[in-house]
Amino acid sequence: MRAVVLTEFGPPENLKVADVPQPEPGPGQVLVEVEIANITFVETQIRAGRAPNPAMLPALPAILGNGVGGTVQGRPVVTTTGGTNGYSERAVVPAALPIPVPAGLSLADAVALLADGRTALALVRAAALRPGETVLVEAAAGGVGSLLVQLARDAGARVVAAAGGPRKVAAAGELGADVTADYTRPGWAAEVGGAVDVVFDGVGGAIARDAFGLIRDGGRMFCYGAASGAFAPVSGDDAARRGITLVRGAQVTPEQMRELSVAALEAAAAERIKPLIGQTFPLERAAGAHAAIEARHTIGKTLLLVQ
């Protein structure tokens, strides 16, 4: 079968399509005929050998990819793969992992929601948003950010969507944000128009620091990503002095992860949320997909079309 194999950490060009042995399911496992694979920013960091956590680096050679959509005995499903082997035509996973795709939901949308949907739902639930609150969403044109904009809007919040560059700002505005801000521009925080109650931080670095300064005393900040390459430089002491609740990570258990993924798929099937799929790449262009993500040329989700 065909798969994208990484033999050495480094630039995107190190991702090569090769013929590899087909995996065979053992007891309690199923074989997934993969049609679409999810690509994440973290996977570009892993490929480069710069994972946020060194324990995330796989032994080489490796096949990256942690989320796929395809069929199990003809039934459309989405599933995690345990961290690797997603960029391939077939994958073996525990039989309990695949989640059926609800009727009326495309496989592409289901794959786009598998990880980002559960993350966004977990963050919104933890924030316990109240109608009328002002919520700042960083990376608002990204996979998680675009869903956070929709969920916060539906919770009755006033949504400020912050993104990098005019194209992404425009996309975030089309999702229903009340205010948009371009954080590639100096002084971007002034575009927000005042204090906010909640920040969803998927960027980290200097942008997260600026966003923290916008939170009114007693507000909340949820840090779940480091697209800038560094996590939010905000200390617990700084937050405590202002009465700000600071939460790092989505804080979900393995049991909750499945429930949240199912809830996200059901919400999309009911047309309450819609993943923003900005671009797709064929399996042979996995390196190009990684390069586009690293260059910040992508919007929303990037998917790999395997078959």
Image (cartoon, rainbow, N blue to C red):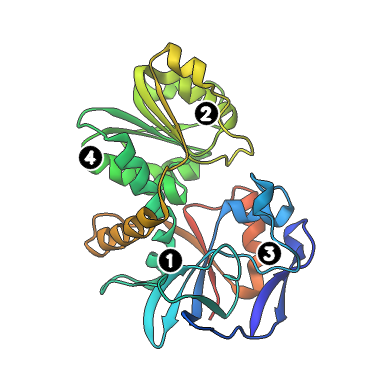
Q: Are marks 3 and 2 in contact (CB under 8 Å)?
A: no
Category of crowding for the residue at label 1, using alpha-carbon neighbours closer than 10 angstroms: few (below 14), some (14–19), many (at least 20): many
Category of crowding for the residue at label 3, using alpha-carbon neighbours closer than 10 angstroms: few (below 14), some (14–19), many (at least 20): some
In the displayed orientation, state which residue is furthest to the top.
Answer: 241
Q: Earlier in the sequence, mark 4 or mark 2?
A: 4
In the picture of the structure, the residue carrying the numbered disc 1 is 111
Alpha-carbon span between mark 3 and mark 1:
20 Å
Residue 103 occupies which quadrant of the picture? bottom left
Residue 46: in sight, yes or no?
yes
Q: Are marks 3 and 1 in contact (CB under 8 Å)?
A: no
In the picture of the structure, the residue carrying the numbered disc 4 is 155
Q: Earlier in the sequence, mark 3 or mark 1?
A: 1
Alpha-carbon span between mark 1 and mark 2:
28 Å
In the picture of the structure, the residue carrying the numbered disc 3 is 287
Q: Amino acid at mark 3?
A: Ala
Can you give x and y, in whole percent of width and height, for residue 250 in the image?
43, 43
Label 4: element kind: loop
Q: Earlier in the sequence, mark 4 or mark 3?
A: 4
Q: Is residue 197 above or below residue 51?
A: above
Residue at the image point whose x is 66% and y is 63% from the top: 288
Residue 70 occupies which quadrant of the picture? bottom left
Residue 208 is marked as 2
Which of discs 3 and 2 lies nearer the camera? The answer is: 2
Q: Are marks 1 and 4 in contact (CB under 8 Å)?
A: no
Question: Which of these two is toward me, 194 or 225?
Answer: 225
In the displayed orientation, state which residue is furthest to the front.
Answer: 27
Q: Amino acid at mark 4?
A: Ala
Can you give x and y, in whole percent of width and height, for residue 294 in the image?
64, 50
Q: Is residue 53 left or right of residue 6?
A: left
Alpha-carbon span between mark 3 and mark 2:
29 Å
Residue at the image point whose x is 19% and y is 32% from the top: 131
Q: Amino acid at mark 2?
A: Ala
